[in-house]
Image (cartoon, rainbow, N blue to C red):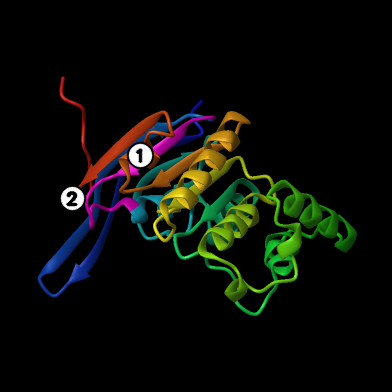
């Protein structure tokens, strides 16, 4: 059983000229433990596909099974519950909350999960230590470098122990060494069992994973032969 199974996924928008498709007839399987990169030119549908996999977008057609659960048949509340239980999301723009400290930003995902305060504090402390950012815990995002903000973003995505990590251009705003550090971290997480799907324009970033899916004009490009 695949972790993710997509069949004939389509996404479109209505325009003055008719219908504009973002994704067309996308079918693919992703196994537990894979590190997959989604690549393609701008406008190919990469981020939209990631949003659908992450259950952040529900306005599409087709069939999507996650751990054999039919996501396409779930109501909004059930999709959100499945997302919170299984998925962490890393964004290019970090999406940290400006008026919360690093520790408070890490606590946010736990506050949605009915964890007791003492347990949450322990989990935040463990994550701060794991990412070597204990000294940053009382700082605000504006006081951090881009690389440090992205580290906090990754830590926040992982703090509840998701089985699937989604990353949308996670190194797009970082300089080269910061980007390599993040990708090496992803590689270690994947080796420890976390399934990772990243959207990237970078061939170097894609080389850290084990499979590349190419999108063009909303279609999955098939290898010749």
State the residue lying farthest toward the top.
225
| Whether residue 220 is situated above or below residue 81 in the rendered picture | above
Q: Report if the CB atoms under discs 2 and 1 are less than 8 Å apart.
A: no
| Whether residue 179 is situated above or below residue 224 in the rendered picture | below
Between 39 and 183, the one nearer to me in the picture:
183
Question: Looking at the image, how many numbered discs can be counted on the residues?
Answer: 2
Q: Could you tell me how far apart the alpha carbons at marks 2 and 1 are, in whole angstroms? A: 23 Å
Residue 34 colored magenta? yes
Dot 2: element: loop
Between 139 and 81, the one nearer to me in the picture:
139
Residue 110 colored magenta? no
Sequence-wise first label, 2 or 1: 1
The part of the chain drawn in magenta is: 33-46
Q: Is residue 8 visible?
A: no
Indicate the quadrant containing the C terminus: top left, top right, bottom left or bottom right. top left
Residue 19, picture quadrant: bottom left
**Disc 2 or disc 1, which is closer to the eye?**
1
Dot 1: element: helix
Residue 59, picture quadrant: bottom left
Q: Which mark is residue 204?
A: 1
Between 160 and 169, the one nearer to me in the picture:
169
At x 15% / y 24%, what residue is drawn?
Answer: 224
Residue 156, picture quadrant: bottom right
Mark 1, Cα crowd under 10 Å, few <14 / some 14-19 / many 20+, is few
State the residue lying farthest toward the right.
118
Mark 2, Cα crowd under 10 Å, few <14 / some 14-19 / many 20+, is some
């Amino acid at each position: 059983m695949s972790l993710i199974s997509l069949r004939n996924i389509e996404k479109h928008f209505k325009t003055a000229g008719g219908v504009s498709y973002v994704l067309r007839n996308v079918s693919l399987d992703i196994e537990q433990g894979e590190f997959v990169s989604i690549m393609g030119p701008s406008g190919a549908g990469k981020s939209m596909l990631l949003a659908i996999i992450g259950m952040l977008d529900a306005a599409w057609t087709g069939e999507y099974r996650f751990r054999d659960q039919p996501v396409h048949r779930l109501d909004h509340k059930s999709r959100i519950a499945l997302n919170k239980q299984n998925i962490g999301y890393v964004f290019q723009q970090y999406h940290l909350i400006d008026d919360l400290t690093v520790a408070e930003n890490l606590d946010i995902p736990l506050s949605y999960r009915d964890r007791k305060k003492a347990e949450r504090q322990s989990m935040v402390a463990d994550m701060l230590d794991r990412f070597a950012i204990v000294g940053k815990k009382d700082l605000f995002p504006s006081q951090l470098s881009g690389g440090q903000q992205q580290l906090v973003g990754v830590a926040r995505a992982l703090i509840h122990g998701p089985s699937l990590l989604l990353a949308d251009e996670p190194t797009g705003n970082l300089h080269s060494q910061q980007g390599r550090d993040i990708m090496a971290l992803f590689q270690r997480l994947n080796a420890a069992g976390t399934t990772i799907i990243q959207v990237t324009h970078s061939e170097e970033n894609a080389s850290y994973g084990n499979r590349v899916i190419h999108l063009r004009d909303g279609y999955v490009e098939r290898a010749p032969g």
